[in-house]
Image: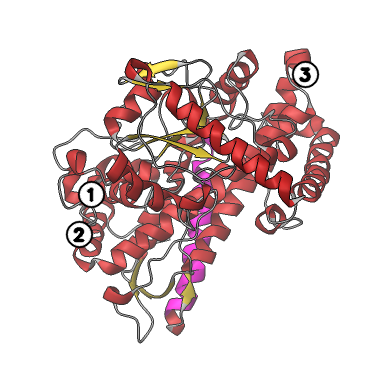
Amino acid sequence: MSFWILVLAILAGLLWSSLRGKHTGSRRLPPGPMGLPVIGNLYKLGDLPHRSLHRLSKKYGSIMFMRLGLVPTVVVSSPQAAELFLKTHDDVFASRPNAQAAECLAYGNKGLAFSRYGPYWRNIRKICILELLTNHKVEYFSAMRKEEVSNLVKSLRVAAKAQTVVDLSFMVRSVIEDMTFLMLFGRKDDRFDFKPGLNRRFKTTSKVLDKYLEEIIEEHVRDARETRATKNIDFIQVMLSLMESQNDSLDRENVKAIILDVLLAAIDTSSTVIEWTFSELMRHPRVMNHVQEELQNVVGNRLVDESDFSKLSYLDMVVKETMRLHPVAPLLIPHESTEEIMIDGYLIPKKSRIIINIFAIGRDPNAWSENTEEFYPERFIGTNIDFRGRDFQLIPFGSGRRSCPGMQMGLAVVRLVLAQLLHCFNWELPEGTSPKNLDMSEKFGLAVPRANHLLLIPTSRNAVNE
């Protein structure tokens, strides 16, 4: 057996050499580190791949070629390079590679996030944008968001009175989870703990999730007469209504796959942005004071309303700066090239995986000056940089055809929770923890949250009328 393993390793090494060697002259691959037989450059990723790839890009450039196993992979690490892949040649790179997890969990890639580019994906995206994620739908759920955040404020008032330490990471995630369930299902739901479910093996997880979602759908079908009277107040009701009108275009598996996309995209991402924002504010009291002064001047002695957002310019800069330094998904979901193409003088083979390292892009000194590691919201003063994907130095939601369609919904949640908690409370670190030694280590996954929960002590800041 060991003999054949050795033979395989030698053959893989020869294949690697031949693939790198045959593309010479005007058809050369981008520069990149040499890999090992079979595993390629997988060993170079480490525990935090976004940081490892950032370090490698400093040596090999903003368009870097690697092999992850035997898969040709191109890592993109600058705004200019990202624009080439996500805008100039977006049609070539709009597809996704096959992923076993998505096959198992998303009903054979029937969701929006991981399905291949083509007529099916275009139809599903159109449905989601026009029926589920419009500005009207975002506004429709504003009262629900306000009520849930108000409940969080009341809970924190109790903790503030007792001067107890709270796990802000857990509390924020819980309230966002409640918001998401209300938006999807029309009610909160504690029958299934979604996050631990994802930690099981794929096949077991898919069965658990499928059973849970089938129960939810069946409840909505049984209550169809009542839900019609309430004009489709949640996502499942909208999707079931579309199933009736779209005939064969949608079925239950489509509905369940889209629901899973929303669950994955909504809960961990929003809570992660909020906890990183609080972490940076605790380390930078000057910025914290500036945000709270703006809130007091704009909002006064009442709870923040979403109509206040347009006047909270400094809060907006704080959120942008957090997403620059701590992008929730520092490596965008991989794209895949549908044909061989030359980009910036380099050959990009067909079926290459394209990894956009927005962590590295957020630290590009050519885009952000030399203080890229500093949390400095004022860098956005006088700029028009926003999240919509047209400014390639800041693309936390991606750009082009595969950009996140739920951006407005996510930003509404993040801004409301942050604004409310910063306006109603002052925050302190537990005794023995100073801002300078606050643990800022990361934990890599679909999202990249803090490795350890953020523990803080709230104190009521002003007599906000609730």
Name which of mark 3 and mark 2 comes first in the sequence. 3
Question: In the rendered image, which quarter is residue 14 located in?
Answer: top right
Drawn side of residue 438 relative to residue 40, left or right: left
> Label 1 vs label 2: CA separation?
8 Å
Label 3 sits on what residue type? Glu
Name which of mark 1 and mark 3 comes first in the sequence. 3
CB contact under 8 Å: marks 1 and 2? yes
> Label 3 vs label 2: CA separation?
52 Å
Q: Which residue is mark 2?
A: 290
Whether 228 is among the magenta residues is: no
Position of residue 286 measured from the top left corner of the image (x, y, whole percent): 18, 65
Q: Which residue is mark 3?
A: 244
Q: Residues within 10 Å of mark 1 (few under 14, many from 20)?
A: many
Magenta stretch: helix, strand or loop mostly: helix
Residue extending furthest toward the front: 3
Label 2 sits on what residue type? His
Which stretch did the figure color magenta? 139-160
Q: Residues within 10 Å of mark 2 (few under 14, many from 20)?
A: few
> Label 1 vs label 3: CA separation?
46 Å
Drawn side of residue 212 relative to residue 115, left or right: right
Question: In the rendered image, which quarter is residue 258 located in?
Answer: top right
Badge 3 marks a residue whose secondary structure is helix
Name which of mark 1 and mark 2 comes first in the sequence. 2
Q: Which residue is mark 1?
A: 314
Label 1 sits on what residue type? Tyr
